[in-house]
Image: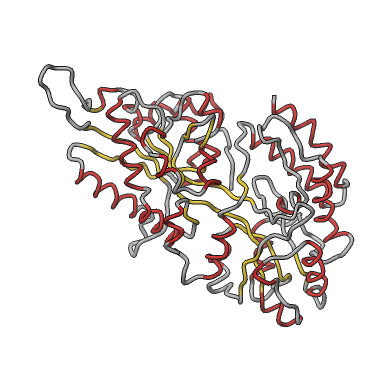
Amino acid sequence: MKMWKWSKLSTALLGVALFVSACGGGDNNDPAAGKSSSTNEPGATEKAWTGEIVVWDGPRWSDDKENKYHWIENKKAEFEKLHPGVTIKIVQTPWAEMEDKLNVSIAGGAWPDLVYNVSNRMASIKNIESGIVEPIDEFYTADELADFYPNALKEYEYEGKHYGVPVSTRVHSLLLNLEIFKQKGVEPPVDGKWTYDEFLEKMKQLTGGGVHGFSTYIMPSYYEAWPFLMMDGGRPLSDDLTQYTFDSPEAISGLQKFLDLKFVHEVALPDMGMSNVGDTYQAFAAQDKRLMAVQPWNSWAIASSQKEPYAMDLMVAEYPTGDSGKSISMGDVLGWVMLKQKDEGKKQMAMEFVKFLTTTEEIFITAKNYGVFPSRISSGEQRPFEANPQMERAQQIAENAMMVPRHTNWQKIDEAIQKELQLAVNGTKTAEQALKDARSQVESLLK
């Protein structure tokens, strides 16, 4: 879940004219880019809007020709056939480049019409308050909106309106190598549920003979460890995103339990929290390593751990519950956002295309093929992962996941907190000291 990395504005703006021209975004705020949907001439009949709609999308799953844009290209062709005179221009945008290019287009005032991205980026409160993002409520009935999982739809809500259409969610869960459980004679948690005490006891039983029960990493923009910090009721920010709250007794207690896995109980690898993503996964999944039985991962790791060279007897489990009595997981939401439009006819047609892309069937297809979890309840009821019990279990976890905060300065807030967590996990600071030291850094970013 990489966050925004702002390019140097002075350099970016030098290339904005060329970039906008290349992506076709220069016409997006010009009513002359298409013909209006209606006319004021006496006796005239209303005509459907015609013109070009610019859509930015990233690569998804490949077809047999290794084309990762085949799905959106096929939907474009179908929609254009249904709406003569409408052209959908697909701007293929690698995910790693999406943020910088969006920043440039917004700074230049020549953004695309539709963007597919993570909710806390394009549908950020900053963009909404700036008037860059269009609300979508007028195009949906209450019953239609009720078909979206509440935690997914909430990510696009601000002051009673919705500023995007969720398509899918990603979530963190615990992955268990059942081969190690069997070798150690340890029973996995029933239905993938356990308390922290039960989790700790099993980690102790799994540790020994060159194997540890658990490990993970601490890095900016990665949240595999955070559900442990929140298991006792701690939260990074207040509900209204105006106050830092991660130094509460509940948060300190959660971090202490996490640190105890390494420093007190010694059930975690000695380098827990200090390794990178690739090395941590290799230590868990590589056939010649498999140094721990349990690791938390985003949902991509499920598919990776089901096929060679990493295939294993895999189980998906919830994070352990703490004093709050609830298992916490973190995730994010991806969906479509419509940027500010001046032509009403074009706005209606653009949203018509969004609805065309986000039917129950299309969200089901995306979930099944792309390995993400559906945002629509009706799509989830079709069981896209019926043949994959591990993914189906993770989908259940996703339906109640907490999402990354939508604060405008979240990237910097995240970096400040993660830096202190790294100092705690390497033994430099106590749990209390680390979380309290983050306060002054975060408070300056909340103003």
Q: What residue is rendered at 59% in x and 52% in y? A: 400
274 vs 203: above or below: above
Q: What residue is rendered at 83% in x and 71% in y? A: 204
Q: Nearer the viewer, residue 197 or 440?
A: 197
134 vs 94: above or below: above
Percent across and percent down for residue 129 are 53, 24
From the viewer's perspective, tell me whether residue 391 is left or right of residue 108.
Answer: right
Q: What residue is rendered at 84% in x and 49% in y? A: 253
178 vs 70: above or below: below
From the viewer's perspective, tell me whether residue 316 is left or right of residue 382.
Answer: right
Q: How did the renderer colour the structure?
A: secondary structure
Q: What residue is rendered at 73% in x and 71% in y? A: 291
Which quarter of the rendering shows the C terminus? top right
Percent across and percent down for residue 84 are 17, 40
Q: Nearer the viewer, residue 154 or 435?
A: 154
Percent across and percent down for residue 168 are 48, 51
Quarter of the rendering containing residue 343: top left
Disc tally is 0
Outermost residue to the front: 143
158 vs 378: above or below: above
Percent across and percent down for residue 87 are 24, 39
